[in-house]
Amino acid sequence: MFQNYFKIAVRNLYRNKIYSAINIIGLATGIASCILIFLYVQDELSYESNFSKSERIVRVVGHVIFEGQQDDFSVTPLPLANAVKEFSDVENVTQFTRAGKQTIWYEDQSFTEEELLFADSSFFDLFDYELLAGDPATALNAPRTIVLTEELAVKFFGGVEQAMGEILKFSRDSYTVTGVYRNEGHSHIAATGLLSRSTLDSKISPEERTNQWFNLNNYTYALLRGQDQVPSIQQQLDNLTETKVNPWIKENNLNAQMKFVAQPLEDIHFETRYSHDLSPHGNMSYIYVFSAVAIFLLLIACINYMNLATARSSKRAKEVGLRKVVGAFRGQIIRQFLGESVLLTLIAVLLAIAMVQVLIPSFNNLTEKQFTSDFFLQWQFIVVLLAIMLLVGVAAGSYPAFFLSSFKPADVLKSDRQPKGSSATLRKTLVVLQFSISLIMIVGTIVVFSQMHFLKNTDLGFKKEQMLVIDIPGGDSILVQRLPIIKQKLEQHPNIEQVSNSYSIPAESLNRALMLVEQKGKMVEKVIDLLAVDYDFIPVMGIELKEGRNFSRDIKTDEGSGIIINEAAAKWLGWDNPIGKKVKTGDRAVSDGNAQIIGVVKDYHVSSLHSEVQPLAMVLAPQSPGYLIARISPENQAATISFVEEQWRMFDQKHPMEYFFMDEFFDRQYRAEEKMLTIFGYFAALTIIIACLGLFGLASFTAEQRTKEIGIRKVLGSSTGSIVLLLSKDFALLVLIAIVLAIPVAWYGMSKWLQDFAYRIDLSWWIFVAAGILALTIALVTVSFQAVKAALLDPVKAIKV
């Protein structure tokens, strides 16, 4: 029996080549898109899953409140680790801090590494990376030891075994390699190497180690005894705040509040509120969006199958009638049609796998992931693929199976007309649903593109173009002392307009500083972003002064007592006339902690347009470690950079010169949105293509059904245009209904997405009109192809059909 079912299914697919091809290509495209999206979503959701204890690990984060202003930090004070270790529900604690960018020398080679951490010996107890060499319990015990990733061991020494016991030279210390670990899986701890935290012991004061609760520069993680003990640990953190932290705050006369929160490890990747985090975050809204897109694509492919199957039901009605006459039961007919659907889906799945295999390299470039064909052998993928095949096969074939099997033999054998219970209403509903989804995708693509164009072309309040930024290696005090001479040499080149240096640049995190500011005759505590700059920073960056003056070399008191703020700071502090206002700060760039406001600059964006401009204070530090910023002309850039590198080597033979352009660096903040735009655009195009395939098939079937009618109309004098209009208007009406239904959904969805940006475009009416016209045009072009073909048919041949 099953062999007979299979033969009938194959013959039917072969007999209807065009419709079978449309279904298979549509389904294969939808399934391939689903597989790719599944890989992306699974990869994003797999963060921290490589750690066997991930469900019992929490990160302790901090909330600091000054004068009602809350700052959320992923970094915490040093004494927190020992305090948490005493909690009854805590099994172990590890604490580490960033080492910053480091230049490393081995023999005659130098390397620059940014993702290095100072970690203690309990690190590997919580984060159980596989050690390829060394003992995880002791590898980080001794001072000046380092544990490398496998990649760095190969990079420095050529292999794992060769690395053990070797010595790497840093700017200030030398470190012995005591271990090599394999950094597999995804984690927010994107470390390429671990330096022993005990190296820092001599540099940490007893006060900072035991009772300094506002020095936030450590990442603290706790291993709980059980998975359900987060509420308990949170209660103990609250008790710690009441018994130790608050008394310390009161003792030091700080008008502040602090709260520690236990954050589950597996929540970190998608939590974006905490500053100074270790790596870029994911975006859960994108997971939802792409998952919805995958469902939409599959749904549209299934709709195509159901539409074409029900549309062609009259062609198979007599087959059903005859089979019932000779004794076939309805259940057998249902199994026959479901079997055909599953067979077609199986072919589509095989084609989809081949498509995925071809597309993986391009998809990797698009998503910046490292997918390989190995996932075809994973049991999770096989289960998902079988589920898709059965679900799509049964879902897509269910209506045709139950609809066709319900035909009465007497009704279907009398004529070629389809029996009562026509599926035309269902087909129209499904077409409306298809194009509603397509229109939502079109609107989404237009909105994301428009927002990205807005982000990249909005006036940021500073000039980021043609800005060459040179990284000043940290820890090299001699190089910092030479900065004025280096700047002078660089400015001698005709293509270098001006040079400045600063501790930070836009798109980098700024230091936060506690300041006492003058308000209503008294000094009030405030926390503000602080940026150390030189005399030329404001003119080089093209930042506009609103009032007051810039730092001046002729006024010696500027270095140590002059502060320039932005408009946001003046407004936040409630100053209508900020010039001359007194400020006290503990920052080392301000002598004796006393300063006054000498200028106000117009607001400029130091971070992306996701957030509003924050209050900012600039202090003068003419030889600040951080960056050299050179504004260069666009002509002969390669020659200009070569000159800069030549001058660099004259002053620093130890460190390789590392540079980048500020506009590229700043725009990296929108990489996630750019990635979403590209992925969304591709899948929107696929959605439209699949919908058009179905529309093409329906138009072909409609033209075939009305062949005689078209011939008679032409004999009676109807023009080609009137026949095309006749065949197209019904589909145009369906698309117009889809536009009306889709616009509110698209408006709501994109309004929610735009809320992630403090500065955003308006959802103008033209976006929806343009999307509607585009969808209608695509539909009419698709239908018109078949309509024109039918209208040009010889009337005599049409009537004879």
Image: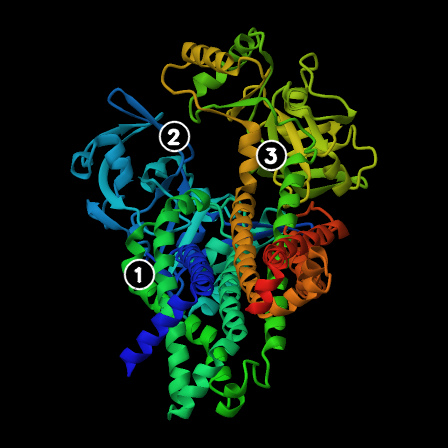
Disc 2 from disc 1: Cα separation: 31 Å
Q: Which residue is mark 1?
A: 52
Tag 1: Cα neighbours inside 10 Å, few (<14), some, or many (≥20)? few
Q: Which residue is nearer to you in this view: 429 or 660? A: 429
Residue 260, above or below 599: below
Q: Secondary structure at mark 1?
A: loop
Name the amino acid type tagged 1: Ser
Q: CA distance from mark 2 to mark 3?
A: 27 Å
Residue found farthest to the right:
576
- For label 3, the residue is 586
Marks 3 and 1: which is nearer the front? 1
Disc 3 to disc 1, C-alpha distance:
44 Å
Residue 355 percent coordinates (x, y): 38, 53
Residue 155 position by quadrant? top left
In which quadrant is the N terminus drawn?
bottom left
Residue 218 vs residue 357, the one in the foreground: 357
Q: Is residue 468 above or below residue 394?
A: above
Q: Earlier in the sequence, mark 2 or mark 3?
A: 2
Looking at the rendered image, the quarter that the C terminus falls into is bottom right
Mark 2 or 1, closer to the camera: 1
Q: Are marks 2 and 3 in contact (CB under 8 Å)?
A: no
Q: Position of residue 472 (x, y in %)?
A: 47, 23
Q: Work out whether mark 3 precedes mark 1 in sequence or the reverse, and give the earlier one.
A: 1
Looking at the rendered structure, the kind of residue marked 3 is Gly
Check disc 2 and report the residue beneath it. Answer: 102
Please state if 398 lies on the left or on the right of 6 as rendered: right
Nearest the camera: 439 or 259?
A: 439
First in residue order: circle 2 vs circle 1: 1
Give the residue type at disc 2: Gln
